[in-house]
Amino acid sequence: MTQPDEPRYVQEDEANLSVLEDKNIAILGYGNLGRPLALNLRDSGVTAVTVAELPGPAWDTALADGFSVKPVQAAAANGEIVFVLLSDELAPAIYQKDIAPFLQPRTAVVLASGFNLAFGKICPDSNLDVLLLAPRMIGSGIRGMYRKGLGFPSFVSLEQDATGNGWQILCALAKAVGSLRAGALTVTAAQEAKLDLFVEQTVGPDLASAILTAFQVGVDAGLPAEALLLELYMSGEMSKSFQAMADFGFFQQVKLHGFAAAYGGMVRFMALERESRSENYRQVLEEISQGAFADALDAEAESGFPSQALLDEMLAGNDPISQAEARIRKHMRLGDPQRLPD
């Protein structure tokens, strides 16, 4: 079996912020990702940043943050670097109607998700640079890490280089938003999309199922609901264990726990039947790779998002876990008091 090429790592010394001087940068979508990226760009000295939004709360927030705000079409026409930071399911229609017809040749189009490129939902013209800058961090974390002087990892890719300057622009943007303080890893848009969807649709549901099952079994056995949630995740111990995996290694972090915890975990892990899970994961990845999920998402959008009602019902806060969480927060101070606000 041939060994795959090792990904390329990108560090700060590869980037030159002067590449962005006098470049008009448009941020299309001032939401959970657009706002922290725009603020980080400005704090790095990139001043020619315009926000593109529809009139509404996001437009008002961008104005309050001190940005010039324009309609999407006008911002796309004026931008030399255009960030398309719209949700995967809505971006293709907006790009086709309100962005693509107004882009000038040699514009750099920057996406934070490889989804629409990977599955042919967005096909930029050949006279454009196409860049992928995909933070591996939620929006509030992007801003918080930047303000603390720290970085966050990203996946980056030069998908199309019409000008010959695409890589320099990509590196400069990754530095300006704060990612290269940690470093970036090169993967293609197709790989980023598969990685993102694969983990979201395998590890994510498994973790959720494990927590819900443990909560129900424990409550049924007479354990206090509030104590269960503290033990499962609300104390922050579990998140610290995940952070320790990042800091020390998947196996090495076990050394931070006592023997009883390590022994119990090992015994139960060895008893798990993992082949059926492996087969399920392989099937999920195959369906993602062949575009079945992308097609299903298209069908959901074309039907008017009928699943939204179910999601809203699930997230209404009327379930036993949400109610127990509320009781805990009423009586305990949890979280990081040093977390910087946006």
Image (cartoon, helix red, strand yellow):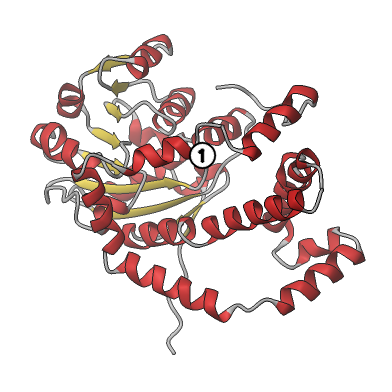
Taking the image as shown, residue 37 lies to the left or right of residue 328, namely: left
How crowded pointer 1 is (Cα within 10 Å; few <14, some 14-19, many 20+) is rated as few
- Taking the spot 33% from the left edge, 52% from the top edge, the residue there is 114
**Tag 1 residue:** 138
The quarter of the displayed image where residue 56 is located: top left
- Residue 314 picture location, percent across and down: 49, 40
Work out whether 248 lies above or below 106. below
**Residue 251 appears anywhere in the view:** yes
Residue at image point 53% right, 78% down = 276
**Left or right of 270 in this view: 20:** left
Q: Is residue 148 left or right of residue 260?
A: left
Q: Position of residue 21 (x, y in %)?
A: 33, 28
90 relative to 117, above or below: above
Q: Nearer the viewer, residue 192 or 206?
A: 206
Which residue occupies 23% across, 57% down?
295
Residue at the extreme bottom of the image, as rendered: 1
Looking at the picture, tell me which residue is in the foreground, 70 or 321: 321
Q: Is residue 235 left or right of residue 127?
A: right
Q: Looking at the image, which is closer to me, 236 or 123?
A: 236
Quadrant where the C terminus sits is top right
List x then y, in percent, for residue 168: 34, 46
User: How far across and down, in percent of the image, does residue 139 sit?
Assistant: 49, 34
State which quarter of the image contains the N terminus.
Answer: bottom left
- Among the 4 quarters of the image, the one containing residue 88: top left
